[in-house]
Amino acid sequence: SGARELIKVSLSDLRSFLECPLTGAAAVRLGLRKRDLADRAAVENEPFQSDFLESWSLQREVALGALTGLEPAEAVYDRCLKRLQSEGAAPFGVFSEAERGANLQVVRNWVAYLRNTPGRPGTWRLGGNRSGAEAIDHALPPLTLTVKVAGQERTVELGGDLRVQFGGSLFLETGKRPSASALGKVRKKALAAFVDHHVLACAGEARGEHLARFVYEAAVSGQQEVTFRFPALAPEQARERLRAWLEDLLNGDHAVLLPIEAVLKGWPEKLTRESILAFVDDSLNGPVVTPFSTVRGPVPDPASYPPPADPKAIMDLRLKDYLDLVCGVAGEGA
């Protein structure tokens, strides 16, 4: 019957919901989505001749290919570049050579640092292979959870891609390792690793504590990595947390302004309705316009929505342990 129809939710939409309930709920409940790059803020101002998204993807694809140990970085780069050139997404000739040197230097710095990590990077996916051409190292069945929706028990299937796993969830970052006062972006990105941790634990694939690893192209004071460590989870704990998030996503009133960037800035004691309004006003109308997760979403005029009356109570239920951990530490050096 219709009441028992399977509900499919992607990991991408679940992450969007945790970053911005308005955006995530619009995706799952209304089908409103906008293709975006999670790390766009980190790369949109880089002076690439190629489209920034293609260069951003190319650097990471080459680094991960080289770390498998099967080919040197230069060979992986040239193979990937030929594909992009055939698609009209990368230049030829002199411009191509100039980019090659700059892109490969970033890749070499990451690879040299990560050679010390045992094993090799692995790709993980819940559910079917979308593209058909792409090989996934660890293909797991989707997670199925029983969730109450509008008072009825429904089966929800959670599927999609995790981040590349290599000693934890791996994030390859350009530039120098940031200071403790400039960790806002990585604290937000670490939420993806927190979701990975729950998915892997629920699937019985966890290996104790889980790391969010941010590896930079350049070290500062001998440190090239920022690390957040999430404590070990039992499978039942992880399953219950995923179920609670999905129930929240599928039932709550999420027509509110609650971007994770504002939450992180105010957490814990300064997070109020007023602090969210002030954050949004400063981000959109301050001397430097800084987009945040809500305005990158598909909902028109998102700043017209009100913040919830008690954002702290909502976030205590939804993400307290993640927030306490990433806001309470300055990010370890590896």
Image (cartoon, rainbow, N blue to C red):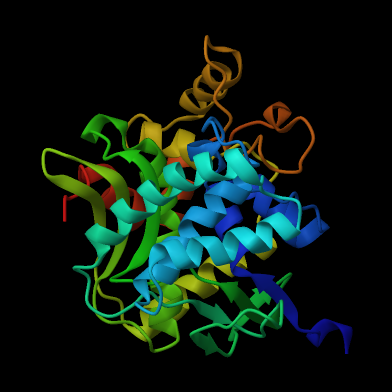
Position in image of residue 56 (x %, y %): 53, 49
* Residue sticking out furthest to the front: 93
What is the count of numbered marks?
A: 0
On the image, which quarter does residue 237 sit in? bottom left
Position in image of residue 16 (x %, y %): 60, 54
On the image, which quarter does residue 280 sit in? top right
Is residue 310 visible to the viewer in this orientation of the structure? no
Q: Residue at x 45, y 87 (%)?
A: 203
* Residue sticking out furthest to the left: 221
Is residue 304 visible to the viewer in this orientation of the structure? yes
Q: The N terminus appears in which quarter of the rendering?
A: bottom right
* Residue sticking out furthest to the right: 1
Position in image of residue 73 (x %, y %): 40, 63
Position in image of residue 276 (x %, y %): 51, 28
Q: Residue at x 24, y 72 (%)?
A: 209
Q: Is residue 88 left or right of residue 105?
A: right
Question: Which is more toward the observer, 238 or 77?
Answer: 77
In this view, 204 is above or below 9: below
Q: The C terminus appears in which quarter of the rendering?
A: bottom left
Question: Which is more toward the observer, 71 or 303?
Answer: 71
* Residue sticking out furthest to the top: 287
Q: Residue at x 26, y 30 (%)?
A: 181
Question: Which is more toward the observer, 3 or 101?
Answer: 101
Q: Residue at x 32, y 60 (%)?
A: 212
